[in-house]
Image (tube, rainbow, N blue to C red):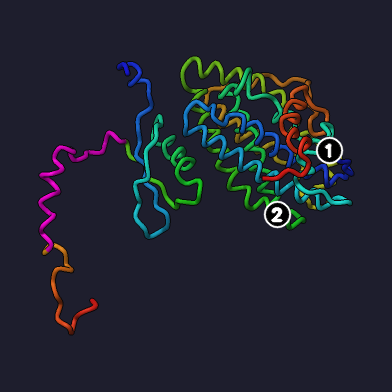
Amino acid sequence: MTETQTQNEWPLWEVFVRSRAGLDHKHCGSLHAADAQMAIQMARDVYTRRQEGASVWVVPSSQITASDPADKGMYFDPAEDKVYRHPTFYKLPKEVDHM
Amino acid sequence: MTASIQIQKTPELQYLLRLGDTCLILGQRLGEWCGHAPVLEEDIALTNMALDLIGQARALLTRAGQLQSPAFDEDQLAFLRDERDYLNPTLVELPNGAGRPGDFALTVLRNLMVATLLKLLWQKLAESSDSELAAIAGKAIKEARYHQQHAADWVVRLGDGTDESHRRSQAALDALWRYTPELFEADAVDEAAAASGLGPRWADVREAWMAEVGDVLAEAGLKPPADSVFRSTGKTGVHTEHMGYILAEMQHLQRAYPGGAW
């Protein structure tokens, strides 16, 4: 793709939908739109047409900083053998079990 | 081939068919964009709206059919009437623009005109003396509000956009404007509906329509052309040459395979 083509394309937006009041907004996909207002409208039509949503957020994809896939090993693998970081690792006294 | 049905054109039936056919025929026109809209997201938006309109048409035609003796169902009314028995205003049967799928500027401008009209009518129809019609209106008004907002957004973007988008939007307005007086033409059908409490005269929402559409056009930098003496006549069943082609496409399946269903 040439530079001009890239510049002519609408920017990418990440879409987050909250399915019900009280729940979190969950990432559900992305779309192209000229600006935030258009992105909200398109998100409504693309991602909430089967009653999925009670609220929609859109965020310019360019504003998201992501971890580098190359760092995956260094970042996440060391947690593998640290079972003691899970609360379930600890045996509770019988009196306070079923917390 | 299945024969056409013969309807009894009572004022009440005509009033409901004008509404139902407006939704049915515009829904059909918007459906032509399926797979052809400028971007994927817009493709879904236009067809969502087409389906909203078909849903409204189904409810209205079902209600209209119940008032006939013998009664007709929604499919008979949608697919087995002759052209003169369709009572939508001419505006909604006009093609989306030259060629297929047509002109996006014209499509969104017409959507603005029709969605504004329907929104204003649904607001008053929610008070209809016919509780069935009032219930249909209560549901449809939310859809019409969104259709109006979606269309207004595009009309402003295109009218106030590039030289080309402005030129094409103004051309669309010049082409469509002369079909708008028909929407508000008063006649005996509307008078009967107003008298019985079935619904408003379409003329009753003219002022609000002018104000709402006028605001969007002003923001878009578009100017309506001078009023003309031309009056289209779709609401009385006298249609343009475009109507026959739509009906041929819509009716083919039901006439070739009578009673066919999904």
- In this orientation, which residue lies closer to the viewer: B80 or B182? B80
Provide the residue designation for mark 2: B134
Question: Disc 1 on helix, strand or loop?
Answer: loop
Residue A36 pos. (x, y %): 39, 36
Q: Could you tell whether A97 is left or right of B222 in the image?
A: left
Residue type at mark 2 is Ala
For the image, the number of numbered tags is: 2
Residue at x 62% of width, y 47% of height: B141
Chain name for mark 1: B
Residue at x 86% of width, y 50% of height: B68
Q: Main secondary structure of the magenta part?
A: helix
Q: Is residue A79 magenta?
A: yes
Q: Could you tell whether B64 is left or right of A59 in the image?
A: right
- In this orientation, which residue lies closer to the viewer: A17 or B259? B259
Residue at x 57% of width, y 27% of height: B217
Q: Can residue A95 be seen in this view?
A: yes
Chain name for mark 2: B
Residue B98 pos. (x, y %): 63, 17
Residue B82 pos. (x, y %): 83, 34
Discs 1/2, front: 1
Where the C terminus of chain B falls, by quadrant?
A: top right
Mark nearer the N terminus (1 vs 2):
1
Report the Cα–Cα distance between label 1 and label 2.
Answer: 33 Å
Q: Is residue A88 above or below residue B208?
A: below
Farthest residue to the bottom: give it: A95
Which labelled disc corresponds to residue B2?
A: 1
Farthest residue to the front: give it: B257
Q: Give the range drawn in magenta.
A: A61-83
Q: Is residue B203 above or below residue B69?
A: above
